[in-house]
Structures are given as C-alpha cells and as structure tokens.
C-alpha cells in the first residue's frame, strides 16, 4: 500500500467503485442503494479500516482533495460494520440502505487537514447467491476524517494501534 497515489479512486478500486467524502468522526450518514432488480437472496456486509496519508493538497480550481503526492504511511486495525447498519428496504425493488457509522476513527486529528490525514475506507459488499458461481461486488467510501471540537488534537501516527507500512 505504500507509494504515490496517482488517483485515490484508482488506488481503492476505480472511479465507479469509490466515493471520497469528508465527515467529522461523530457524523453518521445513510445512503440508499438501488440495484433496480429483485435482490431476494443477496447477502450484504461492510467493514472499514483507517489509513494515514502523509500529506494532502486541494485542487485550486474545484476545491477537491488531490492525492497526487500523498503516501500511505500506515493504518489502524479493520473493523466490521454491524448488521444493523445495512437495511434491505424493499428486496423486490432492490433498495438497501447503508448507514456509515459514527466513531469510525477515534484517534487524534491534526486540525489543518493536510498533514497525517486519517482516511477511513469503508467497503460495502453484496453477494448474489442466485447465480452459480455466486458473484460478489463492492463499493467503497473513502472518508476524510476531519477535526471537530470533541476530537483530541494530535498526530494520528502516534496513536495506540497505529501500524507503520514499511517502505522499501
């Protein structure tokens, strides 16, 4: 995972499979997926892991995060998203709600949002058990964790559980 990130979307799975968003650690968001088909028999799961990048800039023209020179320096352990955060709203219509939980990352954050940036990558997976062999697909959310008053100001790379990614 170490190295330059020419495009964060390419890094975690391609432009169609990842959304980059900014949230406070206390934010919890709901997103509805519409598969436009009957999803009876599908299974769903989600997990997440927080990675730390050394630096990040923003595009002057549109204000979007720019990861061209960012390097992943380490990570924290992954965690499962509870089953209560995935709700099949209408199986015959193909709608499912995913709740991105709050407190995904509970460590320190540097308020300037440009140095040692924690990014929680949440993967939402679905498996169609109606076909043989079963097919599994996924969608990822890259959540830029942002400073808020209840977060301890500090360097995320100094937190308990942080694992450095060796460089070669």
Image: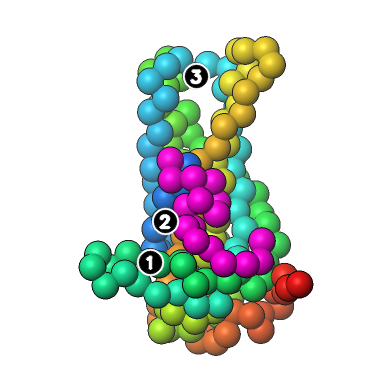
Mark number displayed over residue 141: none
Q: Secondary structure at mark 2?
A: strand
Please report whichever mark, 3 or 1, sits nearer to the chain's N-terminal start.
3
Please report whichever mark, 3 or 2, sits nearer to the chain's N-terminal start.
2
Q: Label 3: which residue?
A: 39
Pick the quarter of the image with the N terminus.
bottom right
Q: What segment carries the magenta color?
A: 1-16
Residue 150 part of the magenta segment: no
In the image: residue 25, left or right of residue 51:
left
Nearer the observer, disc 1 or disc 2?
A: 1
Give the Cα separation between the discs numbered 1 and 2: 9 Å
Asked if the residues shown at circle 1 and circle 2 are in contact, with their CB atoms under 8 angstroms apart, the answer is yes
Q: Label 1: which residue?
A: 65
Q: Label 2: which residue?
A: 20
Q: Secondary structure at mark 1?
A: strand
* Residue 19 at x, y percent in the picture: 42, 50
Please report whichever mark, 1 or 2, sits nearer to the chain's N-terminal start.
2
Residue 3 part of the magenta segment: yes
Which residue: 56% across, 77% down? 54
Can residue 106 be seen here? The reply is: no
């Amino acid at each position: 995972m170490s190295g330059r990130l020419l495009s964060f979307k390419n890094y975690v799975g391609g432009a169609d499979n990842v959304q980059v968003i900014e949230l406070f650690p206390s934010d919890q968001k709901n997103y509805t997926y519409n598969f436009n088909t009957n999803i009876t028999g599908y299974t769903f799961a989600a997990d997440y892991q927080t990675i730390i990048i050394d630096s990040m800039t923003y595009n002057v023209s549109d204000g979007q995060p720019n990861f061209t020179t960012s390097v992943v320096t380490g990570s924290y352990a992954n965690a499962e998203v509870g089953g209560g955060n995935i709700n099949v709203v209408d199986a015959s219509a193909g709608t499912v709600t995913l709740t991105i939980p709050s407190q995904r990352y509970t460590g320190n954050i540097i308020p300037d949002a440009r140095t040692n940036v924690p990014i929680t990558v949440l993967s939402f997976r679905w498996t169609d058990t109606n076909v043989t062999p079963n097919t599994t697909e996924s969608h990822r959310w890259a959540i830029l964790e942002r400073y808020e008053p209840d977060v301890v100001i500090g360097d995320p790379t100094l937190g308990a559980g942080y694992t450095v990614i060796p460089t070669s």
